Amino acid sequence: MAQVAELAGVSVMTASYTYNKPGRVSTESRAKVLAAAESLGYPGPDPSARSLRRGRTGSLGVVLGESLTYAFEDPQAASFLAGVAEVCAARGLGMTILPVTGADDDGVRVREAAVDSFIVWTTTDEDPVLDAILATGRTTVVHGGPARDGAKLVTIDNRAAAAAIGGLVFAGSRQPAVLGFPLDRERIQRVERGIDPHAATYPVTRERLFGYRDAAQAAGHAWADITVAVCSTNNAVEAEALAAQLLGSAGPPDAIAAMSDEQAAGVMRAADRLGVRVPLELAVSGWDDAAVASQLGITTVAQSMRDQGKACALVAVGAGRQRTAEPWSIVARASTGG
Amino acid sequence: MAQVAELAGVSVMTASYTYNKPGRVSTESRAKVLAAAESLGYPGPDPSARSLRRGRTGSLGVVLGESLTYAFEDPQAASFLAGVAEVCAARGLGMTILPVTGADDDGVRVREAAVDSFIVWTTTDEDPVLDAILATGRTTVVHGGPARDGAKLVTIDNRAAAAAIGGLVFAGSRQPAVLGFPLDRERIQRVERGIDPHAATYPVTRERLFGYRDAAQAAGHAWADITVAVCSTNNAVEAEALAAQLLGSAGPPDAIAAMSDEQAAGVMRAADRLGVRVPLELAVSGWDDAAVASQLGITTVAQSMRDQGKACALVAVGAGRQRTAEPWSIVARASTGG
DNA sequence: GTGTACTTGTGTATCGTTAAACAATGCGTT
DNA sequence: AACGCATTGTTTAACGATACACAAGTACAC
């Protein structure tokens, strides 16, 4: 590319300025440089060299804890990414979705990523990938959790929200139950009474369990009496199966608090299939205020994943201050009765 | 980082080998280097410098013609990205989603992207961004179209598929109609008889129009008599409105071929609302074989966006040969009658 | 004791840019 | 005429790493 400068009869700096600060160079020289570039088929400054010299890449890395494809299958993750993408597009930044395969070379891959900052989708307390990211020293924003020194956190107050919606769905219940996300990355399906919230290493799961516990206790129930069904994934089909299991057991629940609207929809289907009337015989609550929640009339915690994605991106690029907590609200619908 | 080598008492090359070819260096030296790196807080080789020196970035660029957020809103685009992501994850590549805002600096931004190759989501014949990409000389794979010298193409045979499904939906019809995607990037909504397929600069739209024309003519209709309703976007709500307009007009269609299942679902809703019985009074066909198509019993063209995404990625990384055409098939359901 | 091969460490050159400081020129002002 | 100032071009020195070639040491066979 020094060739371009040579052909144009100017110095390389003049060529460089032509691309970076066109005002810095005379119209004449600029034209000569562009003509030379054209005739040599020079495609403009090399991105890698530029990144190296400038010290920034113009791209923002997003790490999805699960498989890479997960991002495009979970509508919540998709909304979140849309929010991140919105900010990236507005600022002309690229958005690099980083592979995390679960193999032990994960840290390496993350370390090799040419990005200026990282956004990490909700993960577990001890996730080694997060450690690897923090070790790079680049700006890191964690969505959901865990909180870490050196990383910013963007999340709603899951415990408070769970307590609030628990207050609704458990109201007047004799036998509440909880249908939840995986506790840890093992993602083992379990159905057990009074699972200790501390057992969950996903902070989001943990905080919500705490919130539901708060609500149950406030309603006069002992947590040890309350069945917690832990899914292996966020999925309506699995939720339906687990809900059917709960409803078919002795002393079935008359209130189920789920951690997503997909799960709640599964519960609704199970109830429908078993002839259990909602909300008369079973109160149901979801989370996220997804489209399915309004379709089925599910009481839910409304939060905007898209806004949270935007918030993460803004914090990551250094615009936008980190808020203490993102907003949420309760949307009461028919599934929790009158 | 030469500091690391110095502290470890070895040459920089030894340090470099420690990270890249651990076998190339003795266990002892490796330990010294890693210890030194640890104590200096050195996070490993800088990705930009590495890219510069190596000549590749380990990341694959994806360009979505629309706004960046579009990717996460259109389920077809999402499936496609999931396919790309799958291949990236398997090979340890990053996936960079590039911003294209529509401003005239797009070419610049694309040129600045630190990626090894590009995948371009279906766009128009004259898209300047595609030109900018081709000008970089990097491997480029176009999904859908347009075909270009210097770019590989991954697509189904849209014309043949449209002709095939047109044969079904137009069978026995006295008054066929087409509900289609935008013709060009202006994205103007139009309802007109016999729109010349050549007017469409989106090759996907154009080829499908040709296919429907083939089918209509084969069924004995003059293309000039057939109403084509062009949507401004792929959206069930807009499709429903347009379908209602068609069905409410004088000489309403008794067969509507749509270009997506979302659109077809909109048509079904409009018919339902207007009391038009499907398929007795109105035959409907969609495209993509999305979930909604099986739910509503819509005859459709099945294609796997995910597989096409995988195909694009494989071609982009140089594994996997370009196929002449991706597979598709017709799924006949109730919406096109007996 | 010599030849061959393998292991391990190092020096050198270079990847393609850009930041920063400096020089040369022209122009309006006092 | 001398000065400040803006405009434009150039020089120099990195940015941080790796490919390659070469050298020194070790091991083994004949």
Image (cartoon, coloured by chain):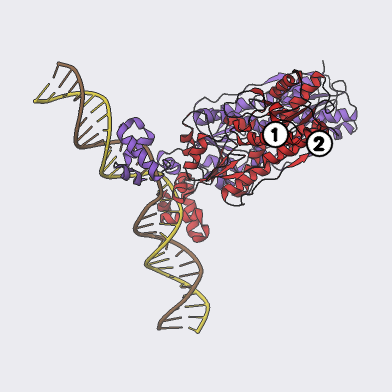
Chain colours: A red, B purple, C yellow, D brown
Dot 1 and dot 2 within a common chain: no
The answer for which chain carries disc 2 is: B
For residue B229, say whether it is visible: no
Considering depth in this image, is B195 or B62 the residue closer to the camera? B62
Mark 2 crowdedness (10 Å alpha carbons): few <14, some 14-19, many ≥20? few
Expressed as whole percent of the image width and height from the top left, the position of residue A60 reads 55, 43
Residue that mark 1 sits on: A213
Q: Amino acid at mark 2?
A: Glu
Mark 1 in CB contact with mark 2 (< 8 angstroms) = no
Whole-number angstrom distance, CA of label 1 to CA of label 2: 61 Å
Query: Residue A233's quadrant in the figure?
Result: top right
Indicate left or right for A67 with B28 as reference: right
Considering depth in this image, is A113 or A323 the residue closer to the camera? A323
> Which quadrant of the rendered structure holds the C terminus of chain B?
top right
Q: Nearer the viewer, mark 1 or mark 2?
A: 1
The answer for which chain carries disc 1 is: A
**Above or below B198: residue B297:** above
For residue B310, say whether it is visible: yes
Q: Amino acid at mark 1?
A: Arg
Residue that mark 2 sits on: B192
Which residue is found at the position 64% from the left and 23% from the top? A190
Q: Which mark is residue A116?
A: none
**Above or below D30: residue B88:** below
> Which quadrant of the rendered structure holds the N terminus of chain B?
top left
Expressed as whole percent of the image width and height from the top left, the position of residue A128 reads 50, 34
Q: Secondary structure at mark 2?
A: strand
Indicate left or right for B189 with B155 as reference: right
Expressed as whole percent of the image width and height from the top left, the position of residue B196 reads 74, 34
Q: Secondary structure at mark 1?
A: helix
Expressed as whole percent of the image width and height from the top left, the position of residue B279 reads 84, 21
- Total number of numbered labels? 2
